[in-house]
Image: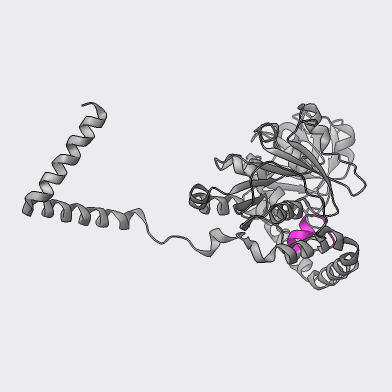
């Protein structure tokens, strides 16, 4: 099957998906494509993704390519760097069924750019099975890195740690920390009634702020390096905590400067050697939250490898500290699904109506109360 379309190109997949249209051809530079990247590409509606890198290198069993295959998205893999060097955003390109990429809408020798390999469900499954054999080796490396950094990062849980002076009241309240990780959409949907009833302080970690907006909620605080937060979220009125390096460098201030938010009274810079989600959990703890509910946070080997991290010293320490108040709601949507279907509700509603009609027919008092209620409603509505 040949593909023809407008090329959208970016080395950062999370930036590219913001510009993708279903008719576009996506060009990424993403070795070992993770689940979140794959799900965002699928959500864009594109029919083909071209990757300059191997989408599954064999280092560990990443599920991104499997998800693309299951969604019917074509994946032209390991095409190299030539397209990035010779093509520009918005150019019309074509892809032949042999995996050749051409400039323009026709496959010509003059327009040839590069060649890759179309992945199939069988090739991805084989690569995935081979990668699973590397889990033990990755786990050992991961554990060693975590241990080696524990002593270096122990200061992140010290009692004299500086905490941004946010003005949002947190003490004795519930705090919901949202990270755009695995199953975050489903979990937020399940937690809608909890959010409406308990009215927790809502903290979005980078793209988690947009996840809250998409779910119909407004974040009170946004924490992160701000590279995957939309301008709409940044301008929503939330207090902003820019995650900086330990030496004080804060690249996350650049998008805020463009929006005129860098010098706002609601913007703080927090230099700390940890992940952004660690900062969000620490903030809630240090500000006296009564309960901390985490959605979409990373907490296992595959997820950390997906994020490109080789250890979890900071996360281990932060969770040790916040553990007494921390509830990890990740995956709650898969824990229980209601078994009550609409078809089961109708008989219950019908039975209730029968009981009410019977009561009205045999009880004058019930009829009098009903008439009073109707009269009150008419008075309220001015009828």
> How many numbered marks does the figure carry?
0
- Quarter of image, res 130: bottom right
Near-viewer residue (233 or 168): 168
- Is 243 situated left or right of 222 in this image? right
Near-viewer residue (101 or 272): 272
Magenta stretch, residue numbers: 302-310
Residue 95 seen from this side? no
x and y percentages locating residue 56 in the rendered image: 78, 57
Membership of 309 in magenta stretch: yes
x and y percentages locating residue 309 in the rendered image: 83, 58
- Quarter of image, res 303: bottom right
Q: Residue at x 63, y 61 (%)?
A: 328
Q: Residue at x 70, y 38 (%)?
A: 239
Which residue is outermost to the right?
247
x and y percentages locating residue 67 in the rendered image: 66, 54
- Quarter of image, res 70: bottom right
Q: Residue at x 67, y 35 (%)?
A: 233
Q: Residue at x 23, y 35 (%)?
A: 377
Membership of 292 in magenta stretch: no
Looking at the image, residue 175 lies above or below residue 143: above
Near-viewer residue (39 or 333): 333
Q: Quadrant of the C terminus?
A: top left
Residue 169 seen from this side? yes
- Is 302 situated left or right of 114 in this image? left
Near-viewer residue (111 or 256): 256
- The figure's colour scheme reads one colour
Looking at the image, residue 353 lies above or below residue 234: below
Q: Quadrant of the N terminus?
A: top right
Looking at the image, residue 195 lies above or below residue 240: below
x and y percentages locating residue 297 in the rendered image: 69, 56
- Is 312 situated left or right of 229 in this image? right
């Amino acid at each position: 099957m040949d593909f023809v379309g407008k090329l959208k190109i970016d080395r950062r997949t999370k930036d590219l998906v913001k510009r993708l249209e279903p008719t576009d051809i996506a060009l990424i530079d993403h070795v070992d494509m993770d689940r979140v990247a794959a799900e965002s590409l699928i959500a864009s509606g594109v029919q083909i993704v071209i990757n300059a890198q191997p989408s599954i290198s064999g280092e560990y069993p990443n599920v991104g390519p499997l998800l693309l295959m299951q969604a019917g998205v074509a994946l032209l893999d390991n095409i190299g760097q030539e397209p990035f060097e010779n093509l520009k955003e918005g150019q019309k390109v074509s892809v032949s069924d042999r995996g050749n990429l051409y400039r323009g809408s026709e496959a010509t020798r003059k327009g040839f750019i590069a060649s890759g390999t179309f992945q199939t469900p069988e090739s991805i499954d084989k690569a995935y099975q081979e990668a699973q054999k590397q889990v033990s080796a990755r786990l050992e490396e991961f554990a060693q890195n975590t241990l080696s950094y524990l002593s270096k990062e122990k200061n992140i849980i010290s009692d004299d740690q500086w905490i941004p002076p946010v003005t949002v009241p947190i003490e004795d309240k519930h705090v919901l920390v949202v990270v755009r990780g695995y199953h975050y959409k489903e979990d937020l949907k399940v937690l809608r009634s909890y959010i409406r009833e308990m009215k927790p302080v809502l903290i979005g970690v980078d793209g988690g702020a947009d996840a809250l907006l998409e779910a119909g909620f407004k974040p009170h605080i946004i924490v992160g390096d701000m590279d995957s937060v939309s301008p709409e979220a940044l301008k929503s009125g939330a207090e902003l905590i820019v995650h900086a390096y330990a030496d004080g460098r804060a690249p996350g201030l650049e998008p805020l400067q463009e929006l005129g938010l860098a010098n706002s009274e609601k913007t703080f810079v927090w230099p700390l050697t940890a992940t952004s989600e660690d900062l969000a959990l620490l903030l809630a703890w240090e500000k006296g939250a009564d309960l901390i509910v985490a959605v979409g946070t990373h907490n296992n080997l595959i997820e950390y490898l997906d994020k490109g991290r080789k250890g979890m010293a900071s996360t281990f320490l932060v969770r040790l500290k916040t553990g007494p108040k921390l509830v990890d709601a990740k995956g709650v949507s898969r824990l229980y699904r209601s078994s009550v279907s609409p078809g089961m509700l109708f008989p219950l509603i019908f039975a209730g109506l029968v009981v009410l009609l019977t009561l009205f027919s045999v009880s004058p008092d019930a009829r009098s109360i009903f008439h009073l209620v109707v009269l009150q409603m008419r008075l309220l509505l001015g009828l």
